[in-house]
Image: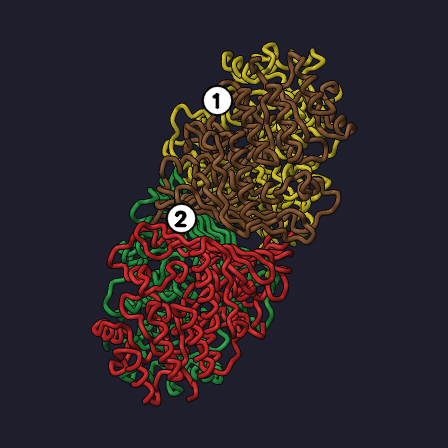
Chain colours: A red, B green, C yellow, D brown
Amino acid sequence: MTITNRIRLGMIGGGQGAFIGGVHRYAARLDDRYELVAGVFSARPEVNRASAEELRVDPTRCYDDVLALIAGESGREDGVQAVAIVTPNHLHFEAARACLEAGLHVICEKPMTLTADEAETLADLAQQKQVQFLLTHPYVGYPLVQHARKMVKRGDLGQLRMVNVEYVQEWLAETPGPDNKQADWRLDPARAGAAGCLGDIGTHAYQLSAFISCLTLDSVSADLSAMVKGRQLDDNVHALLRYTSGAKGMLWASQCAPGFENGLRIRVVGDRASLEWAQENPNELWFAPLNAPRQRITRRDDWLDDDIGRSVRIPGGHPEGYIEAFANLYQALADALDGGSVSWLPDASTGVDGLHFISAVLRSSQADGAWAAVPPAVGKERRSGRRSDD
Amino acid sequence: MTITNRIRLGMIGGGQGAFIGGVHRYAARLDDRYELVAGVFSARPEVNRASAEELRVDPTRCYDDVLALIAGESGREDGVQAVAIVTPNHLHFEAARACLEAGLHVICEKPMTLTADEAETLADLAQQKQVQFLLTHPYVGYPLVQHARKMVKRGDLGQLRMVNVEYVQEWLAETPGPDNKQADWRLDPARAGAAGCLGDIGTHAYQLSAFISCLTLDSVSADLSAMVKGRQLDDNVHALLRYTSGAKGMLWASQCAPGFENGLRIRVVGDRASLEWAQENPNELWFAPLNAPRQRITRRDDWLDDDIGRSVRIPGGHPEGYIEAFANLYQALADALDGGSVSWLPDASTGVDGLHFISAVLRSSQADGAWAAVPPAVGKERRSGRRSDD
Amino acid sequence: MTITNRIRLGMIGGGQGAFIGGVHRYAARLDDRYELVAGVFSARPEVNRASAEELRVDPTRCYDDVLALIAGESGREDGVQAVAIVTPNHLHFEAARACLEAGLHVICEKPMTLTADEAETLADLAQQKQVQFLLTHPYVGYPLVQHARKMVKRGDLGQLRMVNVEYVQEWLAETPGPDNKQADWRLDPARAGAAGCLGDIGTHAYQLSAFISCLTLDSVSADLSAMVKGRQLDDNVHALLRYTSGAKGMLWASQCAPGFENGLRIRVVGDRASLEWAQENPNELWFAPLNAPRQRITRRDDWLDDDIGRSVRIPGGHPEGYIEAFANLYQALADALDGGSVSWLPDASTGVDGLHFISAVLRSSQADGAWAAVPPAVGKERRSGRRSDD
Amino acid sequence: MTITNRIRLGMIGGGQGAFIGGVHRYAARLDDRYELVAGVFSARPEVNRASAEELRVDPTRCYDDVLALIAGESGREDGVQAVAIVTPNHLHFEAARACLEAGLHVICEKPMTLTADEAETLADLAQQKQVQFLLTHPYVGYPLVQHARKMVKRGDLGQLRMVNVEYVQEWLAETPGPDNKQADWRLDPARAGAAGCLGDIGTHAYQLSAFISCLTLDSVSADLSAMVKGRQLDDNVHALLRYTSGAKGMLWASQCAPGFENGLRIRVVGDRASLEWAQENPNELWFAPLNAPRQRITRRDDWLDDDIGRSVRIPGGHPEGYIEAFANLYQALADALDGGSVSWLPDASTGVDGLHFISAVLRSSQADGAWAAVPPAVGKERRSGRRSDD
């Protein structure tokens, strides 16, 4: 099957009332390289059908479940080529496995799975089937995040000393009402997994720090809390990090902090300079050399390397945001499917790495903060999120 | 002809190498309510054809000129319903007139025309033909700009005293190279009209200030400059404003100011509070009451009125940008075409108002800054940009 | 009389309940180079005496009026060497003239006098008597303001194109209560002079722009308003500026703008770069070169030239403020009195220049904004605020 | 001995070339309530004498050592009443002990001593002698820091959840040259003590967080590093905090982080709102309630409680800085010596608390991050830094 023209996309989840599915659709649509042609938008049949109609998906390609979708689409010449999995966490694994086994490219929300073993299984499968697996950590799609990584890699910061990353939100600062669909499954261990805030946004913070710093995590010392009364999962994560290079880090993730919206912020400190970037104003990157004025780098294609400039749609000073960053993942995946080389996309190995991070944080916190090694898993190097071309 | 499903869109201009045409397409695409089906993308046949192919437009619907497009499309059941005109300024008028006369809805770049008379003609025609005319001043598409207007209208600022607006850029700080297509026509009076920076971004600044303040301009005192040697058109605009209410204003527009990217910024001062908003970080709006702490209002649908919240696609703290603002214009037009009521869209009367502003600034500057009245034109009230429902 | 050790200072005005007198005393005290030994602190005898006691001034050196002070002090070996005049505006001239005639150095609040003629008289007198005249425009005492001027002078910005300066406050946004001493005289033409906001803070804005830009003002076009009902003097100033070099400027001063505290802000734009500085966060200076990242310059003595670094008391990152800036004027005056060379102090010629500015703005506004030339006064060059060493 | 008029101050340390001694003198001078009359400015006789002369201290009151100063001054009717100890850390204890035993009030730099035992000894002595002991943690002198504490205490934030504090500098990012006096002793365990960055600025960060949050620290988990090669003491501190209330915290202190000047920053998060304050722009305090706009509170005496407004010398919008904050400590001490009640001054118990913090961090780091309890010392409650009136 050759990928021609628009990529034919299926979607699992993302029906009416969902949030992230809509973002995936904006992202797929923006550069006009995908066409949503099939889906299982909801487990509730009426929502599933209504969503398909609203999305102008042919009713006959609105399926009851993933297996039906695979069966239905595999028989068509114009069947789906890639599937976006945007369900709650606990459903990722089975859906992704089925799609991968059917040879479909997979776009999957994070955290990739509930356990590192599941993640390893998917990573092996993706490799074996030679298909693409895009894990949607969208923040690395921001051009200035990619530029920050470039600066680290080319030595602008010197040798790294410290990484300080945080993702702080307020939206779960109180017990949410029963009609808050986003909160509902995220606070339920059966659907979210053993990690609450840690899995939901702690992984974003960790992945962003790994992406920019290009450091390998050695071990973590963590203190998880459930600040809101009656909460079963963590809603605040404090962690100290040690990297194999000797660099040190701090990570704070919280969903119970009034006054914060989507406060993802990172500072990377080297022995010659430091960097700072914050998601809420993503069109500027601060570069602060030792004993020299701090510089505000903006998102201008004439300043960025060509491969990054490709992710810049409009001139510097005209702000781009979260949807554009997300679309950059979809765009890069389309490039890859068209035979291009894309080195920076979060993939299955990124997902494995994220699950190892989650696992280590949980173990450390349960051991009262004792340093927990990140598993030196077979294949870790291959899946480290830092690739051979880095 | 009823408007069903996706609106069938044609485009005049916007071929390969152009800038704003691409933005229109992002905007049209984002919410999936338009389909680009025809166009005259370039006056150069090969660019026209190549652009159509790249955009997946049926080659038979890629026309040589506007009249051909109208002729070709009017005979089809699935012909275009709306046409986006994204050419240099001097081509707006004829293209728009032809489309309006053919009963097509028009989406037109600003400034609407080269003269106020032309603008009046189009406004009359649009009214007579009962079609929509969207003038793409995209900044009013930002949700917080709309919210700012709401705050002014509901009296949060008290009676307005001062408006201070500026749009400052650096991109024409030097004489551009010959291959700079964007600069080429903008610096040529034959294609840009008599107003340089004034027409290109001064109108944006003026329109934004009129939109938020809801004030009626009485007269202007202006000092235009061509700072860069050899430039035929103004590249810097200094103007003082007087409103009919007694409020006063200042406007600064520049395209030759190193260090500024797309620095559109507005402050509106009332007797009880003031507002500040800047395009480069559009997701915050500052509200500063007398003798009380300044507040940072963010783009959250739970804070904004329903009609504005509709323009918010993702949660506060996840930034939206210029493309989303632009898409809000397209979305609102689609709502209007679907029979909805949209009070805030810049339309033909906004364009007339803009040309009157341009005309007054030019006259004042030529008269060494003498106050120039904004023409009390017949129909001005109807077209004032402040509508009866405001 | 040689100036040894601490300079013996007298003060006119600044009794209990006054504001700026206290600031002068902080400034004089900080570097321990002045000693307040005499004064006429108030026209009301009991306030005068009580103030002297509170300030530990010998009661016999607390005088009834300026002439008595001069008479009393001139007979003492340890008599005052310099006098700070911190009264309302209408009292500056007579007090300063008497002190100058007595051969005393004078430190005087701005605006220097009520008229340009008076200012000329004082300037001539100071020159004839060979004494120092310090006009307290404190904002030029900020190290980064001095650095900004250096950058302009050494060509970092290229040739200047635009200056944009504003000083915006809210404190007179309403009619103040009768017990507001600061407001009382400032709103009274008999004591403040013909210029309200213009004289009080418009002159600060103008002087700051002249200091940094080193440009000579050619003419102004102004629109003064009294926004608050019943106000006799202007409380809002809008002005366009033309410099002799061809550069253009805008000036906004307001005391009736809710949401602004002491919003003195300046932007200077050259053909190669621009600068921005704001008084409310004076420890950073923004330098923005064409097509390069904006830089944040901080107040570090290792970055600034030696003569400016002298004005830096504590390391960069430890903020300095208004009192330190003010103290830098006193410190530089002390250096000058000790025989040092200080080129940047605002002096009598600065005051003349300020009065010419006020006069031109008033004339323009009365002539409905017609451009008013700044008087090409005899001696203007000498007093232009730009000195031979510049 | 009654305290009348200016307080007679002696100083230990602070000779030519020193840094913090000069700051103490600015602080003592600003409000004119102290007079520097005696001192031991340096261990080197010629520097000692030259410093005294420069400071206009009577040569006969320039002593060779602390004991000589005490002996010389105790016999005078106009002898020193208070002594400021501004030497390197290792000299604090003996000097302070001698002064306290002589019944002198003591102003002492932090960290108070090298060990907690020493600190306890001084605290007992100060209590026994009924004299004042001011520990100069100047950051609590900022009016908005005091206001932040008020807001916490009156419940504006609800119940506290998290504290995030950092103090990050670059000035020791490289091995300093041999002539860097400030660095010299700070990097030498014999003079600085066992804590490097931890003792120098980690204590400031901790003390600020204790002051604002009013929380009692239960235990710490820390990871100290010496990032710069060859350094004997820590130059980077990462610590997790647990408070007795269940709240959690993070602390980062670093002196080897390029791009940071005096980056002291604190965020306090409650279940209803959060606060943020940063020393580099100390004239604003951010208050961010749950689901409401973030507010910028400025340093205005009309907004702050009377006891805090007393620390505001000039109007909001006119910036105050580090010297003024420092002077507020001296001013409050003068008030206390004049019989006033000052509840917030850092005192000997604050110093004990700081040494306990240092000790716990060192123990935890040596135990690979195991949680180290803060010693539940006898008298801890009395000395907790949170006093009975809080």
Farthest residue, direction top:
C60
Q: Out of B293 and C3, give the one closest to the viewer.
A: B293
Quadrant of the image occupied by residue D93:
top right
Q: Quadrant of the N terminus of chain B?
A: bottom left
Chain at numbered mark 1: C
| Numbered disc 1: secondary structure | loop
In the rendered structure, find residue A358 and report the number of the disc placed on it. Answer: none
Residue C241 horizontal side relative to residue B140, left or right: right
Residue C281 place in picture, x, y as percent: 53, 42
Residue C358 horizontal side relative to residue C224, left or right: right
For the residues labelled 2 and 1, the Cα–Cα distance comes to 35 Å
Q: Say which residue appears at 66% left-offset and 26% top-offset.
A: D11
Q: Is residue D308 above or below residue D257?
A: above
Mark 1, other Cα within 10 Å: few <14 / some 14–19 / many ≥20: few
Residue A388 horizontal side relative to residue D73, left or right: left
Given the image, on which type of amino acid does mark 2 rest? Answer: Arg
Residue B51 place in picture, x, y as percent: 45, 81
Q: Out of A228 and C190, give the one closest to the viewer.
A: A228
Residue C271 place in picture, x, y as percent: 62, 56
Q: Is residue C193 above or below residue B30?
A: above
Say which residue label 2 marks. B296
Chain at numbered mark 2: B
Circles 2 and 1 in contact, beta carbons < 8 Å: no
Q: Between tags 2 and 1, which lies in front?
A: 2
Say which residue label 1 marks. C17
Q: In this view, does D373 lie above or below B378?
A: above
